């Protein structure tokens, strides 16, 4: 079965380093690692609201143990991210992806709200650029301009045959970088 990233990248899939191909495989898998989460303190109320809607996290920290479980069911890939903070609190952030084609992916954080991203390989890196935020209203997808929440970008880089680094940033045209999470992970195959 073709993975959603393989669908999005097309022939460029073969250029993806081994650790990133493992990360995006269609077989059930889990990424285990740690993340740094950072945002300006004034963003906390907005992040709390976004998290209630299913997006992002309202907590910051360094080297937060993180587990990301992924499954493909039908034409969707489901992501379940679990972060364990030093105070014992566990926070989850779930989403699902679909591949509309044309080097694009749509990630939905709930049945209505999502992000359309363009993906490409640039040297040793896999890069995502936010295209637009979307609302799924029945069969229709309505685009929202990026300036509403900001521009998203993700860079993923292979560190070895098994490990990779990821860096997600949300940058607002007026307020600058308003959210970032970055980490290092290794992917393991798991039973469905």
Image (cartoon, grey):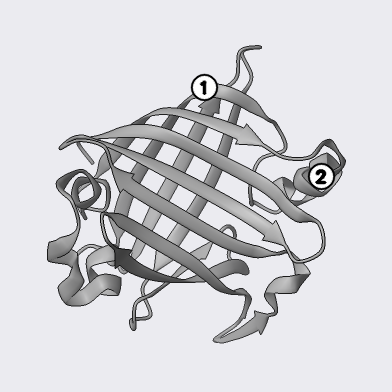
Identity of the residue furthest to the bottom in this view: 140
* Left or right of residue 87, residue 153 in this image: left
Mark 1 crowdedness (10 Å alpha carbons): few <14, some 14-19, many ≥20: some
Q: Is residue 139 above or below residue 84?
A: below
- Earlier in the chain: of badge 1 and badge 2, it is 2
* Left or right of residue 113, residue 118 in this image: left
Asked whether the viewer can see residue 47, the reply is yes
Mark 2, residue position = 43
What's the residue at 32%, 47% (across, down)?
157
Q: Secondary structure at mark 1?
A: strand
Mark 1, residue position = 63
Asked whether the viewer can see residue 189, the reply is no
Return the residue nearer the eye: 47 or 127: 127
Q: Which mark is residue 108?
A: none
Identity of the residue furthest to the top in this view: 87
Q: Which quadrant is the C terminus positioned in?
A: top left
Return the residue nearer the eye: 133 or 73: 133
Q: x, y percentage for residue 17? A: 18, 51
Q: Disc 1 to disc 2, how far (Cα)?
A: 21 Å
What's the residue at 34%, 33% (across, down)?
185
């Amino acid at each position: 079965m073709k993975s959603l990233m393989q669908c999005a990248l097309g022939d460029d899939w073969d250029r993806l380093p081994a650790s990133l191909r493992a990360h995006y495989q269609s077989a059930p898998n889990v990424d285990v690692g740690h993340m740094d989460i950072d945002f300006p303190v004034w963003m906390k109320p907005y992040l709390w609201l976004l998290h209630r809607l299913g997006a992002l996290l309202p907590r910051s920290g360094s080297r937060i143990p993180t587990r990301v479980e992924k499954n493909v069911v039908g034409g969707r890939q489901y992501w379940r991210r679990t972060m364990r903070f030093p105070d014992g609190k566990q926070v989850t952030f779930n989403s699902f992806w679909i591949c509309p084609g044309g080097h694009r992916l749509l990630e939905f954080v709930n049945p209505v709200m999502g992000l359309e991203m363009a993906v490409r390989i640039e040297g040793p890196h896999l890069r995502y650029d936010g295209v637009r935020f979307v609302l799924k209203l029945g069969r229709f997808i309505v685009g929202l301009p990026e300036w509403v929440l900001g521009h998203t970008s993700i860079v993923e880089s292979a560190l070895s045959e098994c490990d990779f680094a990821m860096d997600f940033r949300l940058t607002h045209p007026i307020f600058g970088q308003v959210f970032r999470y970055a980490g290092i992970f290794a992917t393991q195959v798991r039973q469905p």
